[in-house]
Image: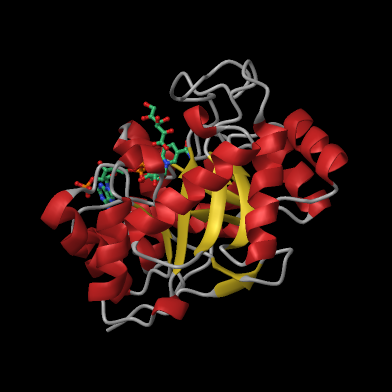
Amino acid sequence: MTIDIPQITLNDGHRFAEVGFGTYRLTGDDGIAAIASAIETGYRVVDTAVNYGNEAEVGEAVRSSGVGRDEVIVTSKIPGRHHGYDEAIASTRDSLATLGLDRLDLHLIHWPNPSVDRYVDTFRGMLRLQDDGLIRSVGVSNFTEAMLDRLIEETGAIPAVNQVEMHPYFPQTALRAFHETHGIRTESWSPLARRTELLSETTITEVAAAHGVTPTQIVVRWHVQNGSTPIPKSAHADRQRENADVFGFTLTDDEVARISALERGRLWDGDPNTHEEM
Ligand SMILES: NC(=O)C1=CN([C@@H]2O[C@H](COP(=O)(O)OP(=O)(O)OC[C@H]3O[C@@H](n4cnc5c(N)ncnc54)[C@H](OP(=O)(O)O)[C@@H]3O)[C@@H](O)[C@H]2O)C=CC1
Ligand SMILES: O=C(O)C(=O)[C@@H](O)[C@H](O)C(=O)CO
């Protein structure tokens, strides 16, 4: 049975979902099968990037899933080497050709790469493509408050989404408050902290036992109740279902706070002020 993942409306009026699907490292025929299985399970937000090398697989999975194109919210990302106004336009056209689609539902700047200092022009190129109908929603990834302030100030446009590292070890409290003020949707990458020891933390296992669900479901639900869209990746149909099946229970405020208290900081060298990803 398909899981009915609730949808939300972004600041530009377009649809998004409370839980989406990550596709990093899902490639080849196995990747197509895994992504199609996620769509059949009920995921409607599918996250890819030029740098994942699997846009072709994502396009094929959308077509083979049996779910209508208009129901799936396909997201891709512009890599650092394509920053710039003309480059962003060319990069997006290449993404569409590789995906075999005529529009992206959400397109993000993958990393700000501040030393290159071309993310504002990149965003302007994306706004142009939005006007042309090739991109529905424009957003960013790995942007700080200061970078968002500058983007808004210099373009007059507010990104619909900022996709950032977020999990109970890194709850992004200040950035989420900023997003809320501006109507930007938070989207959590590596929402399961890439299956590190997070899932066996006593806090997580205790709360899971209290609700009769799995530790992973507790973590996904924690994102949902914090107003962020997690995009867990799994190559396995049973785990895809488990990760999406989080709408039959509710964490108490105290449980959300206990999980957030696991905070310890970023897990990787992913500080947007210094990380450069081409
Ligand atoms: N914008 C950015 O800079 C970034 C974006 N991303 C995006 O975020 C997505 C998700 O992040 P990702 O780094 O993949 O990490 P996740 O936090 O989603 O963790 C994925 C890992 O958890 C395992 N897993 C998934 N579900 C379960 C489960 N129910 N029980 C046990 N293990 C499970 C997966 O294994 P298995 O597949 O074997 O089930 C995989 O090893 C990416 O795929 C990508 O789309 C990620 C990093 C950076
Ligand atoms: O997966 C992504 O979107 C990335 O940006 C990766 O580079 C990620 O940051 C990573 O793999 C870090 O080890």
Where's residue 269, x and y in %?
46, 18
Q: Evaluate whether residue 200 shows in this view.
A: no
* 69 relative to 116, above or below: below
Q: Indicate the position of residue 78 as horizontal and vertical percent values.
A: 50, 41
Residue 144 x %, y % = 69, 31
- Quadrant of the image occupied by residue 120: top right
Q: Nearer the viewer, residue 38 or 66?
A: 66
Give the farthest residue toward the left: 29
On screen, residue 151 versus residue 9, left or right, reads: right
203 shown above or below 28: above
Where residue 61 appears, as percent x and y from the top left, is 26, 66
Tell whether 130 sits left or right of 76: right
Q: Left or right: 159 with respect to 218?
A: right
The answer to whether residue 99 is left or right of residue 261 is left
Residue that appears at 37% across and 57% down? 97
Depth order, front residue of 276/233 = 276
Image quadrant in which the N terminus is located:
bottom left
At horizontal 35% and vertical 59% (from top left) the residue drawn is 99
Q: Which quarter of the rendered image does ligand 1 occupy? A: top left
Check the picture and name the quadrant holding the C terminus. Answer: top left
Q: Residue at x 46, y 74 (%)?
A: 5
Q: How is the image coloured?
A: secondary structure
Can residue 18 be seen by looking at this rendering?
A: yes
**Closest to the observer, 228 or 79:** 79
Tally of numbered discs: 0
Q: Observer-nearest residue: 239 or 94?
A: 94
Above or below, comparing residue 270 to residue 246 in the picture = above
